[in-house]
Image (cartoon, grey):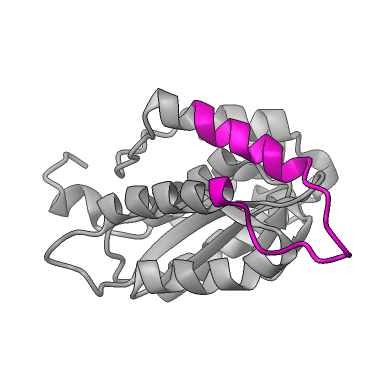
Amino acid sequence: MTEVNILKLIVGPLGEWQLAKGLSVHLSDIKMADIRARFDTVDLTTPVHPLPAKEVEWIEYVREEIRTATPEGGNRGPLTENAEMVEWVIRRQLELYIEPDHLRADRLYVLEFQGPGPWQYVMLGRTANLLRRVTEHQRAASPHGFALVNGWASPRAEKAVSMETNALRYAGFLYGHHYRERFYHMPFEFGVQIVRIVFEAMSDWRSRSGLRQ
């Protein structure tokens, strides 16, 4: 799948007609439900390591704790012990995405942070040291009461800079509500889907994983 085909996948039949005529595509022409339905037709094969059901249930409980937390004296930190344990669980899960023979390879990542009240965001990015980068994001988020509650990372990426640029561009075009790499109130699964589509379209993932093209 080429970059052009990714754009056609996103914009749908109406957008494809506009592109063919050299016309601009407007976000108002596109329905998010249609985009999600089209995304769901893409055969994605990059690894996704789901958390055990019991851990998912516990994380949702702690997420609600974070949502309903009352700041003391106007200070949102530090995180509760439960929130810190959730972060440990997610970091442990992220380790599964780091290939032992490519410990310092470039890769893309998607992280979700939950804060007090309605505040939640998803971060899209790239790094050559996944756990160190995650630590940096955690340190930036925790003083504001935000905890890491979900995460995904790609296999090694030889075009990580271009992939990151395209993932952020497409996510911004489709979703908006963002500040740089932070997408507020974006569903984590949607962020992962965008990044997986971009990664698989711009890499030799299938050939090096032994899958048919």
Give the number of marks.
0
- Based on the picture, tell me whether residue 131 belongs to the magenta stretch: no
Q: Position of residue 115 (x, y in %)?
A: 72, 52
Q: Give the residue drawn at x 72%, y 37%.
A: 14
The answer to whether residue 21 of the structure is visible from this angle is: no
**16 over 43 or under it: above or below:** below
| Residue furthest right in the image | 73
Nearer to me, 150 or 75: 75
Q: Give the residue drawn at x 73%, y 65%.
A: 144
- Based on the picture, tell me whether residue 58 belongs to the magenta stretch: yes
The quadrant of the rendering that contains the C terminus is: top left
- Indicate the quadrant where residue 169 lies: bottom right
Q: Position of residue 209 (x, y in %)?
A: 15, 48
Q: Give the residue drawn at x 54%, y 39%.
A: 189
- Indicate the quadrant where residue 203 lies: bottom left
**55 over 142 or under it: above or below:** above
Q: Which residues are magenta?
A: 57-82
